[in-house]
Amino acid sequence: MLPSRSLSRPIAGALFACALAAVPRALPAQMALAPSAPIVVSTKWLADHLKDPNLVLLHVGEKAEYDAGHIPGARYVRLDDVSVSSHDRDSGLMLEMPQPDSLRARLEALGISDKSRVIVYYGNDWVSPATRVIFTLDYAGLGSSAALLDGGMQAWKLERRPLTTEAPKPARGALAALRVKPIIVDAAWVKSRLGSPGLHLIDGRAAAFYDGVEKGGSKKGHVAGAKSIPYTEVMDDALRLKGAAELRALFTRAGVAPGDTVVAYCHIGQQATAVLFAARALGHPVLLYDGSYQDWSRRDELPVEDPRAGKARAQ
């Protein structure tokens, strides 16, 4: 199985031509998309709002870590709680987005309602699993009321803020029918739009996979035409989202200009969401190729570029 962790291990839709206009360009210190809807919140903000009646706090990480001590009121969430995976080695795909009705029920089971303010945080170094949860909430139409705790559990612990071993009592939420956003695309969509102006395909895997030098794997390299932004590069050493200037430099090096749409993929659709989270913070419309390289590499007719060979080909 491909790595599932973050820094230590790890349908098709129309482009959001109008989405960019709705996203403010100003990027204050906390990378706010709008004053009322920050994409990340600080530990101070969370501490000040822990007792808010509409707060839903989700812990993403190892269960043993959660059981040993977590932020008061946090519910434990697994990626399996908000995704569908097949373990069929020949044709199964991991971490696919559930159908809207199923996703609605899954989110309600986590205590999420229409008026909830959802804060997701990562235990240890599980950044990309946490951003996958954030992306899922955005897909479900709840992105404006969901944010990531900057620095995650480690930042909270370093500041000696309170922890508990007590899990909150289960309480089911109530959501109206989801108004899903068309931010997921498939292989056919990606193939038909490769090279389109203003659209950039980004490989969020570690550089060794993009360059085809990693051990193992049947098809080395990356989707032809994709540029590389390893998911580990969007956070600093303290696992906080990098500042606007640093993030903008990353995307500029990959050829992404302000206002361009970022389409990202990785192994299975997890690590790419960290890249999309950073792109969204900069105001870019974002799309996820959910099947990612697991899907693309199985299709003989789709072009793969192996940098060692210096050319693109269907392998």
Image (cartoon, rainbow, N blue to C red):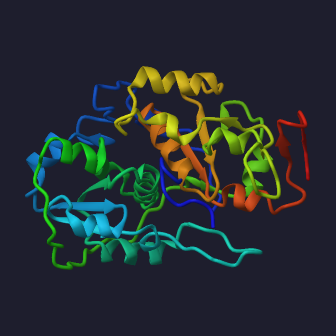
Residue 85 picture location, percent across and down: 58, 74
Image point 69% across, 74% down: which residue? Answer: 92
Residue 1 vs residue 62: left or right? Answer: right
- The quadrant the N terminus occupies is bottom right
Name the residue located 69 percent from the left edge and 78 percent from the top edge.
88
Q: Is residue 147 left or right of residue 164?
A: right
Please give the count of numbered marks on the rendered protein: 0
Residue at 24%, 35% in the rendered image? 35
Q: Position of residue 153 (x, y in %)?
A: 26, 51
Residue 225: give x, y in percent of width and height.
78, 37
**Residue 90 appears in which quarter of the rendering?**
bottom right
Q: Measured along the vertical axis of the image, is residue 249 above or below residue 231?
A: above
Examine the image and state in which quarter residue 94 appears.
Answer: bottom right
Residue drawn at point x = 86 percent, y = 36 percent: 308
x and y percent of residue 74 in the render? 21, 64
Q: Nearer the viewer, residue 230 or 11?
A: 230
Whether residue 113 is visible to the viewer of this picture, yes or no, is no
From the viewer's perspective, tell me whether residue 96 is left or right of residue 118: right
**Up-down: is 97 above or below 183?**
below
Q: Nearer the viewer, residue 301 or 239?
A: 239
Task: State whether residue 278 appears in this view.
Answer: yes
The residue at the far front in this view is: 215
Judge left or right: residue 24 versus residue 173: right
